[in-house]
Image (cartoon, rainbow, N blue to C red):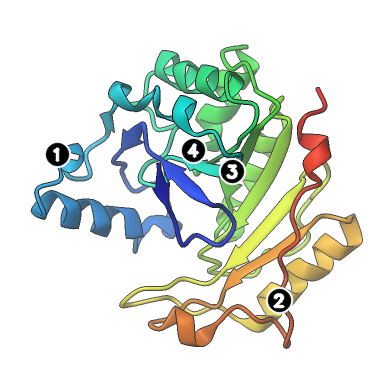
Amino acid sequence: MTQTKIEWTESTWNPVTGCTKISDGCKNCYAEVMAHRLKAMGQAKYKNGFNVTLHPETLNEPYSWKKPRMIFINSMSDLFHKDVPVDFINKIMNVVWNNPHHIFQVLTKRSDLLKRYDSEGLIDWPPNLWMGVTVENSAAIKRIDDLRSTKAKVKFLSCEPLLSPLENMDLEGIDWVIVGGESGRTPRPIKEEWVLDIKKQCNNSSTPFYFKQWGGTNKKAAGRKLQGNIYNEMPVISSVFSI
């Protein structure tokens, strides 16, 4: 487990590392940069750089974490990458089932594989697993339907990095929306009107809205206030454990 600065979670757990680019949101992947840096530092876990690598030796780690917390699974990968076997995904799900005092969060851009595994009955969804998809631009909106079709107990969207307007999203069955701008050396711009429109859609559908950051080359200075306010809305925790 690693403490993280990701605002909407508390810790990260990476039983898989490495990924490949699949859409516009991947262009300036922070995980790729970090993986190569960790490899250069001699970190054994990243000896393969950003190639997809399974780490079965990490599967027992959550059993030692006694204090309840939110845990982002695979901040350095995508659990639904084609090179991650479904039996390994289910080993991770089994860990989640066996640690109900934690909330685990998964985020994927590969909603087609997510939908397929679910439709084939290959995933046994734990009630304390929040399943999300990245929706960075209008081309990625189709991922919402894929997510909605699954039997995941809590479903969320990460509109980060937000690269275009996301108009008229169908938020039925969606429990949470995160919005954020891109950060790093060459961030692509985010517009306030895009964020405000998503917030309006969330208000209209009674969907919790979380504004993570404006991003930019100095994301700390840019902050995360939207029209002077901080938006930290979260799913209702009690609903997570209803089956």
239 w.r.t. 170: above or below: above
Residue at which label 4 appears:
110
Disc 2 marks a residue whose amino acid type is Ile
Q: Which structural element holds mark 2?
A: loop
Are the residues at dot 1 and dot 2 in contact (C-beta closer than 8 Å)?
Answer: no
Q: Nearer the viewer, residue 40 or 83?
A: 40
> Nearest the camera: 227 or 23?
227
| For discs 4 and 1, the disc positioned in front in the rendered view | 1
Residue 211: give x, y in percent of width and height. Answer: 66, 69
Can you say which quadrant of the picture contains the C terminus? top right
Location of mark 1 (residue): 44
In the rendered structure, the answer to whether residue 22 lies left or right of residue 226 reads: left
Disc 4 secondary structure class: loop
At label 4, counting other C-alpha atoms closer than 10 Å, the crowd grade (few under 14, some 14-19, many 20 or more) is some
Q: Which residue is mark 2?
A: 230
Residue under label 3, please give it.
69
Residue count near mark 3 (Cα–Cα under 10 Å), binned few <14, some 14–19, many ≥20: some
